[in-house]
Each structure stands twice: as C-alpha cells, then as structure tokens.
Amino acid sequence: MDRDPAEAEASDMFRLNRAPRSELVPTFPPGSTIPKIIHQTYHAPPLPDALQANIAHLRAMNPGWEHRFHDYEDRRAFIDEVYGRAVLDIYDAIDARYGAARADLFRYLLLYRVGGVYLDMKSSTGRPLDEVIRPTDLYLLSTWRSELHDDYRGWGQHPEVRHLAFGEFQQWQIVAAPGHPFLKAVIERVLRNLTVYVEGLHGVGAYAVLRVTGPVAYTLAIEPLLADEPHRFVDSKRGLGLVYSIFDTDASRRHETMFPHYKNLTCPLVRQTGTRGAFNLAARTARTAARGVRRASALMRRAASRDTR
C-alpha cells in the first residue's frame, strides 16, 4: 500500500543526510594549494601534559608550518565572524557535553574557509608534512580499509556506508585547500542534520554523533562528488605518516580520562525545544508505555504458568 503523501513528507523532513542547508553556507573561492597550517582544537586550556608535548612535537617536526590552537571561545568567535549568527546558533545548540560533535562542525567550517591540516588533539605526525603533501594536492582522503593494522580492523563499517567500496572516510585528520567543494557539501549536510535532529528518531551517544556530525555524514556528503572534484586517496598511516593516537597500549583509559567519551551519554545531542521537544516527550512516553506493557505481559505469563502447575 502506498504511503500517505503527507506522512511521507513528514518522515523525509526528519531523515538524516538529506536536503542540505545550502542557504547558510557562503561559497568561498577554491585555493590552489594546501596552506602550511596545522589546526587543533580543545575546549579550554590548560592542556594536559601529553597534549602539550604533542603540540611541541608537531612544531619541531614541521618547522615551516604554523600551528594554530583553537579553544572554545576561539571557535565561537570564528564561526560568528565568518558564517554569522544563524550558523553559530546551530553550533551552540549542540549540547556542550558532546564536545566531539562541536569539534566536528568546527573543523569543517574552519578548513573550508582557511584550509590546512586538521588533526585531533590525540593525533600527530610521524613524518614531516613537507615530505608527504604534494604541491599539487588539494584534498586528501583516507579510509580505514586501507590501514594495514590490526588495531583498526573493521573500523568505519557502519550500515549507512557499508555499500561503499572504501567504507568510511577518516575525519580525525583533514588535509584540504580552502574553499574545497567537499567541505561545503559536508557543512551543508551537517547543518541540516543538526536542524532536524530528534532524539527519539536519531538516538544519543556515539550512534548519534557518528551519523549527525561525524564520519557517516562526512562520507555521505563527499561520496557523490568524487567524480567531479580534485582529490587524492592516500593511506594516512603508511602514505602520510599520520598517527591516529599518541597514546600507547594504555590508550583507551588515558584517552577517556582526557576526553570523556560521548559513547556513554544518554542526553540528546541537540537541545530539544518546541516541536522537537514535544516529539521527544511523546517518544519517551511511548517507550515507557511499551516497557510497561512488556512487564505486564511477562507477569501475566508467569501467573498463568503458576496456575497451570
């Protein structure tokens, strides 16, 4: 039976990774080279010793490169100045406990305007960038499937990107010239995802971050443009010498001490008000009612079983 048109329209309206918010994103002229700038961001200083040491390492290994550190206030000032209040409001609506999601959006906005090399705070370089980035490079793409390392086996295989031969694109590192169309497409998609996000539909914790702002959204925005826009595929570890995590075998514990992990969060990714708040209240009420029905049914089955014995 065909779906009611109104029902179909309402369903599509809240679907992730559809109809991007193109009216919010200016078109910047594409750059002709990747600027020699390394970008990293953290919510606020002071930085833990391990991260300070990593910054010192990056600067020492890449003396011809500028290192720019962006804290929470730097991010907001940049977004407001370059993209305006509407985009800043969407950024601010991300719950502050989801620092990873805020960092996701910021890195796209920053690299689209400024270009350079973005690295997560836990990530580093094992080779000088001047040795691995070519003068003709405009955008570098890496996937987990090209990483020949047991630690990453099976990473990036989300259902939404499993049909793609390369799986998920990495975005813990982004290497780009300014104004690249890939990043404009990513920003438009992520802004739209954040605008339509509903906890009851799109989940919380890692599930939500990966799909709303993270690598799933990033990959699905870029994939349709691969045939038309300049880029180079390269193994981030073997080809670029990039280090995913500076932490050793104790990485998981040390990482989560410095970066409280969003996978454990149960609050909405985006603050819920108005229609979205009402929708979530209805969804939570329905889930509570469903649990009550299941418990009541289980009690009735146990009672019936006792009666028959």
Image (cartoon, rainbow, N blue to C red):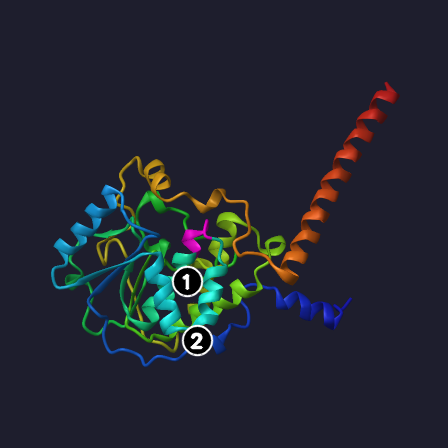
* Residue 304 at x, y percent in the picture: 85, 26
Secondary element at tag 1: helix
Residues rendered magenta in the picture: 96-101
Would you place residue 228 above or below residue 39 in this image? below
The residue drawn where x is 67% and y is 57% is: 279
Say which quarter of the image contains residue 76: bottom left
Q: Amino acid at mark 2?
A: Val
Q: CA distance from mark 1 to mark 2?
A: 13 Å
The residue under label 1 is 105
Would you place residue 180 above or below residue 233 in this image? below
Secondary element at tag 2: loop
Residue 100 visible within the image: yes
Q: Amino acid at mark 1?
A: Leu
Give the farthest residue toward the top.
Answer: 309
Indicate whether residue 100 is drawn in magenta.
Answer: yes
Would you place residue 244 above or below residue 80 in this image? above
Residue 235 visible within the image: no
The residue under label 2 is 25
Say which quarter of the image contains residue 173: bottom left
> Where is the C terminus found, in terms of image quarters?
top right
The residue drawn where x is 40% and y is 59% is: 104
**Sequence-earlier tag: 1 or 2:** 2
